[in-house]
Amino acid sequence: GGYCLKLTNQSGNGSDNWSAQVWYVFEKPLEKGTTYKMSIVAKGTAEYTIGSWLKIGAEGEQVYHQPGNFAVGTEWAEVSVTFTPDVEGADRFIFNFGNMPSDAVLYVDNVTVVVDGEETNLVKNGDYEAKHVDGWNYWTPGTNYALSADGEGYMVFTGPVGVPGYCLKLTNQ
């Protein structure tokens, strides 16, 4: 595999980061007062800081200061934030990127939201290897986000390929 969430700014390119966004809906709301850790592995065609917010329901209150922002560079890197919801009913988080240049692309992979200290990921298919983006949405479905092509996602090579160390050198004597 090698899939990821591919974000493009098709609806924004303004001064407000919320003019282009996608969100993920949890199966059940996060618990007020519980500490969570949210991590992503991401890169962009340009450096950019993704804003992320919690939201209560489709038309409900937005929690602008949580979970936090993710600084994304042009090479794959893991970034994470720890946050504690201070409201009841937060059932989704939003990535905001409306002031990203319209020709830029963000690649987001290995999205996890876990209760701090636990391992169960509340984001289903956060590595996108099931070859879909179910759970993600926007006011116009499919706008601003898509499943990447195979090979565009973050891949970790195991074994000798790409691992620093020894190699066999062949010479013709």
Image (cartoon, rainbow, N blue to C red):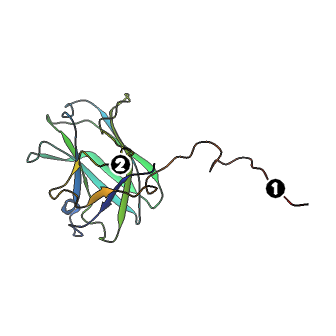
- Position of the C terminus by quadrant: bottom right
Of the residues under marks 2 and 1, which one precedes in the sequence? 2
Name, please, the residue furthest toward the right. Answer: 173
Indicate left or right for 110 with 22 as reference.
Answer: right
- Disc 1 designates what residue? 170
- Vertical relation: 41 (above or below) 122: below
Indicate left or right for 56 with 3 as reference.
Answer: left
Rendered location of residue 31, percent (x, y): 20, 30
Rendered location of residue 125, percent (x, y): 33, 41
Indicate left or right for 30 with 125 as reference.
Answer: left
Q: Residue at x 27, y 54 (%)?
A: 51
Q: Label 2 to label 1, Cα distance in Å?
A: 40 Å
- Vertical relation: 129 (above or below) 100: above
Give the camera-side residue of 143 and 52: 143
Q: Which mark is residue 149?
A: none
Specify few, some or many for label 1: CA neighbours under 10 Å numbering under 14, 14-19, or 20 or more. Answer: few
Amino acid type, mark 1:
Leu
Q: Secondary structure at mark 2?
A: loop
Name, please, the residue furthest toward the top. Answer: 118
Indicate left or right for 155 with 6 as reference.
Answer: right
Rendered location of residue 165, percent (x, y): 71, 47
- Tag 2–tag 1 contact (CB < 8 Å): no
Amino acid type, mark 2:
Lys
Give the camera-side residue of 44 and 83: 44
- Disc 2 designates what residue? 131
Name, please, the residue furthest toward the left. Answer: 59
The quarter holding residue 97 reads: bottom left
Q: Secondary structure at mark 1?
A: loop
Q: Residue at x 64, y 47 (%)?
A: 163
The quarter holding residue 101 reads: bottom left
Rendered location of residue 30, percent (x, y): 21, 34
